[in-house]
Amino acid sequence: MLRARMPRPGRELRLLDREGIDELGALTADVADLAAMVAACEGVDAIVHLGGISGEADWASIRDANIEGTYAVFEAARQTGVRRVVYASSNHAVGFVHQPDDPDLEMPDDLGPRPDSYYGVSKVVGEALGSLYHDRYGLDVVCLRIGTCAAEPHDLRGLSTWLSPDDCARLVEAALTTPSPGFRTVWGVSANTRRVWSLEGGAAIGYEPRDDAEVFADRIGPGDPAKDEVGRRYVGGPFTL
Ligand code: 15L
């Protein structure tokens, strides 16, 4: 999704995945392989770290891919002098935070950790590593607490948490180019009518979302009542189950 939306004049993308990418110059490596990550980061200006398991899994898998992998990314950045890391964190780092009943109350970008899963724990650790590498080594680190990034929302919760692919690209672009962001956490969400997560942190880095999940509202049929309820109640919705 992002790759197709990232090209800019003068920008060269260096792509890396664990499975081969069919594109000239793309690298194949495990994100947790520090030596491979150091080699991949030589001469790079900024890293967009999306690697890892993107949902709940057993502890060993989450630890190996998401925690060891994110450590390797930050450490490789440090060793090679990369100045900025944009980190795909997740709403599940704070998934057990109660959503406000009052729709006028928006949830701030810098909520403290309340993970809802091992996956959420790995995102908390990733953010903590980003904080450490900022404070100790001066890296700029923007952690995006991404909601539901998909072509379109598929349930009631998604009408609030959706991040459209185009807005995702706008958000990553802002995180890559805003001057001196320091360390920060920013919600990754579109300008959804039913949104309860703030857009203030995004605005502070120049993110201007243009999409609204409401255009899909008519297509969302009645869902599983328990999942819809927990989606209203907690940031992380069904992950809390
Ligand atoms: C995430 O962090 C996951 O990567 C994705 O699969 C979705 O479950 C999303 O959160 C969400 O909360 O909808």
Image: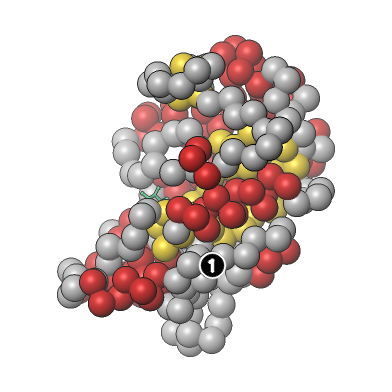
Q: Position of residue 36 (x, y in %)?
A: 56, 14
Question: Which residue is at a point 81% across and 48% down the rendered structure image?
Answer: 180
Q: Which residue is mark 1?
A: 210
SS at mark 1? loop
The figure's colour scheme reads: secondary structure
Q: Is residue 108 above or below residue 38?
A: below
Question: Which residue is at a point 43% across and 78% down the rendered structure image?
Answer: 194
Question: Which residue is at a point 46% across and 59% down the rendered structure image?
Answer: 163
Q: Is residue 99 above or below residue 54?
A: below
Residue 161 seen anywhere in this rendered image of the structure:
yes
Residue 95 seen anywhere in this rendered image of the structure:
no
Q: Is residue 203 above or below residue 25?
A: below
Q: Is mark 1 within 8 Å of ligand 1?
A: no
Quarter of the image for the C terminus: give it.
bottom left
Q: Position of residue 64 (x, y in %)?
A: 44, 26
Q: Nearer the viewer, residue 7 or 154?
A: 7
Determine whether, in the image, residue 3 is placed left or right of residue 152.
Answer: right
Determine whether, in the image, residue 187 is placed left or right of residue 59.
Answer: right
Determine whether, in the image, residue 124 is placed left or right of residue 140.
Answer: left
Q: Position of residue 212 (x, y in %)?
A: 45, 71
Question: Which residue is at a point 45% across and 53% down the rendered structure image?
Answer: 165
Q: Position of residue 81 (x, y in %)?
A: 78, 25
Q: Nearer the viewer, residue 109 or 215?
A: 215
Q: Could you tell me the amino acid type at mark 1?
A: Arg
Q: Nearer the viewer, residue 35 or 120?
A: 35
Residue that extends furthest to the front in the rendered view of this protein: 9
Q: Quadrant of residue 161?
A: bottom left
Q: Quadrant of residue 107?
A: bottom right
Q: Is residue 182 above or below residue 214?
A: above
Quarter of the image for the N terminus: give it.
top left
